[in-house]
Image (cartoon, rainbow, N blue to C red):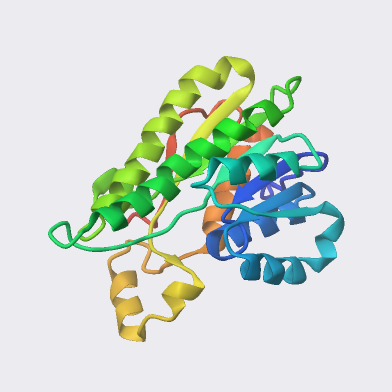
Amino acid sequence: MSSNLNFSFNGKNAIITGGAQGIGFQIALQFLTAGANVSIWDYSADALEKAKSELGKFSGQLHTAQVDVTNRESCQKAVASLPWNVDILVNNAGITRDKSFAKLGAEEWDAVINTNLTGLFNVTKNLFEKFNASSSHKRIINISSVVGLYGNFGQANYAAAKAGVIGMTKTLGKELGRKGFTVNAVAPGFIMTAMTKAMPKEVLEQMAGKVPVARLGETSDIANACLFLASEQASYINGTVISVDGGIVL
């Protein structure tokens, strides 16, 4: 009789950026539950305190750092504070500043590109030397978006940044594969987060109606994809984008 895969990350060390809330928090929780040591990096001190409280039973596995991914010195300080070498990096930190292109200002453009794309560079570059040199099981997982593949009205900045994440993922997959890394991206569709739940019921129903599987995604759907890509079972998957979107783009 077959059974679902159970992932074990005992002895593995993961970093989750933007890990104190939303999708990032769920990714951190599932890695902790699977036995990993996890460092949560987040911009919000309040969100970090709340996350530490909610993850109290994992205190022996948990490290946190307040990090501004747009600031290279902030990233360097977070790297210096790490108690472990790194096996798994999930680049999840991101923001939105949605406006149609006609109304999109330089400030909204710069904020999104600096956080969602340059921030990914800053984190990955500064952490690169902290990966376990002797390991052939090094994982970088970048959170992109379906809008990075297909565009979306009012999100020129976000779509450009997330498309850039995909380009960087594929390039690092080519460059780092021989060094024991796999580098992949996950592209979420409509995901039910605290922010989404605050939307009117009729809007949520309209969104779900556009998805072939007839529901919005859960944060655990994205976390499950990350755990799989970080696992030994995914060791031959490199430089790809996994869309976790219920088929919204079909």
Query: Taking 126 as reference, is 194 left or right?
Result: left
The total number of labels drawn is 0
Q: Residue furthest front?
A: 73
- Say above or below: 87 vs 66: above
User: x, y percentage for residue 85?
Assistant: 76, 34
Q: Residue furthest top?
A: 178
Q: Residue furthest left?
A: 102
Q: Nearer the viewer, residue 104 or 216?
A: 104
Q: Residue furthest bottom?
A: 201
Which corner quadrant of the image does residue 28 belong to? bottom right
User: x, y percentage for residue 68?
Assistant: 55, 52
Query: Taking 47 as reference, is 119 left or right?
Result: left
- Say above or below: 54 vs 107: below
Query: Taking 164 as reference, is 242 left or right?
Result: right
Residue drawn where x is 55% and y is 40% of the image: 72
Query: Taking 84 as reference, is 168 left or right?
Result: left
User: x, y percentage for residue 197?
Assistant: 45, 78
Residue drawn where x is 75% and y is 56% of the image: 33
Which corner quadrant of the image does residue 163 belong to? top left
User: x, y percentage for residue 39?
Assistant: 71, 50
Residue 250 visible somewhere in the drawing: no
Q: Nearer the viewer, residue 41 or 139?
A: 41
Q: Nearer the viewer, residue 152 or 206?
A: 152
Residue 159 visible somewhere in the drawing: yes
Residue drawn where x is 35% and y is 38% of the image: 164
Which corner quadrant of the image does residue 203 belong to? bottom left
- Say above or below: 173 vs 143: above
